């Protein structure tokens, strides 16, 4: 009799096991109804990059967006530092400052063109990439994005920077500086591709600001300005 009762109890426990297991699984990360789907994660990451890109452009694509941001301010190239010292030593510091300002103005003028380029570049993100990025560091999406798209971005962004360089008078300022440097006895001058320098620094600055924006979305609830961002990054 006792054995029969024990067998009934065991059978009842086995019958209940699937339901119990389901309840246990619901509490585990990555399972149950609370788990985020791949589609949700990739949508959230793309939206984060889009919001980050918009914020990045609004912060950099304005007067002093580069020039007064110490994180991304474009400084005199290291290759020209000796020329800078020589020019400042003979009272031409203001001309050097104007050249530095012109480089930053060029970057600021080109920055708005980056928004559409950034947004279009995230369309091919795979589910596997999205999963890795989602569980990565505070700037994982930006780092992935930079690694995958830098060459293409540089090519597409270059015409905008070139136009901005001309508008800001960077090339003219550079030629004037080199002309003044040659007039200084014993001053050595070398050819330098200032256009490529400004292009590289412009992209570098944009990615730095984008990384900061991504970090904000990941760590600061107030930066999650859409329902999708709140759902994806609150987990």
Image (cartoon, rainbow, N blue to C red):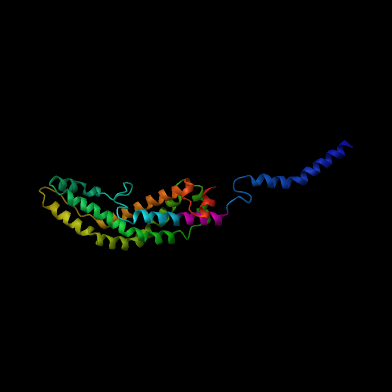
Determine the residue positioned at 55% across, 55% down. 40
Residue 111 shows in the view: yes
Q: Is residue 5 left or right of residue 119?
A: right
Rendered location of residue 174, percent (x, y): 20, 56
Nearest to the observer: residue 131 or residue 65: 65
Magenta stretch encompasses residue 228: no
Rendered location of residue 27, percent (x, y): 63, 44
Residue 139 shows in the view: no
Determine the residue positioned at 24% across, 55% down. 102
Determine the residue positioned at 28% across, 57% down. 106
Q: Residue furthest right?
A: 1
Determine the residue positioned at 36% across, 53% down. 59
Query: The N terminus appears in which quarter of the rendering?
Result: top right
Q: Is residue 139 left or right of residue 35?
A: left
Residue stretch rendered in magenta on the structure: 37-48
Rendered location of residue 46, percent (x, y): 48, 56
């Amino acid at each position: 009799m006792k054995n029969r009762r024990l067998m009934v109890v065991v059978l009842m426990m086995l019958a209940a096991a699937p339901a119990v297991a389901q309840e246990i699984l619901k509490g585990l990360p990555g399972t149950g109804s609370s788990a985020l789907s791949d589609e949700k994660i990739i949508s959230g990451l793309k939206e984060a990059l889009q919001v980050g890109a918009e914020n990045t452009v609004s912060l950099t694509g304005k007067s002093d967006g580069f020039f007064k941001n110490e994180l991304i301010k474009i400084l005199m190239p290291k290759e020209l530092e000796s020329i800078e010292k020589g020019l400042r030593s003979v009272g031409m510091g203001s001309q050097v400052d104007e050249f530095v300002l012109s480089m930053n103005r060029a970057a600021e003028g080109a920055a708005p063109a980056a928004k559409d380029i950034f947004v279009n570049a995230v369309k091919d993100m795979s589910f596997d990439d999205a999963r890795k990025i989602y569980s990565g560091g505070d700037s994982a999406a930006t780092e992935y994005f930079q690694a995958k798209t830098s060459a293409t971005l540089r090519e597409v962004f270059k015409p905008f920077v070139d136009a901005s360089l001309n508008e800001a008078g960077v090339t003219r300022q550079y030629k004037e500086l080199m002309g003044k440097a040659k007039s200084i006895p014993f001053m050595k001058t070398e050819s330098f591709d200032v256009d490529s320098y400004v292009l590289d620094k412009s992209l570098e600055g944009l990615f730095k600001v984008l990384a900061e924006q991504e970090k904000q979305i990941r760590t600061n609830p107030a930066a999650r300005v859409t329902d999708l961002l709140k759902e994806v990054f609150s987990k």
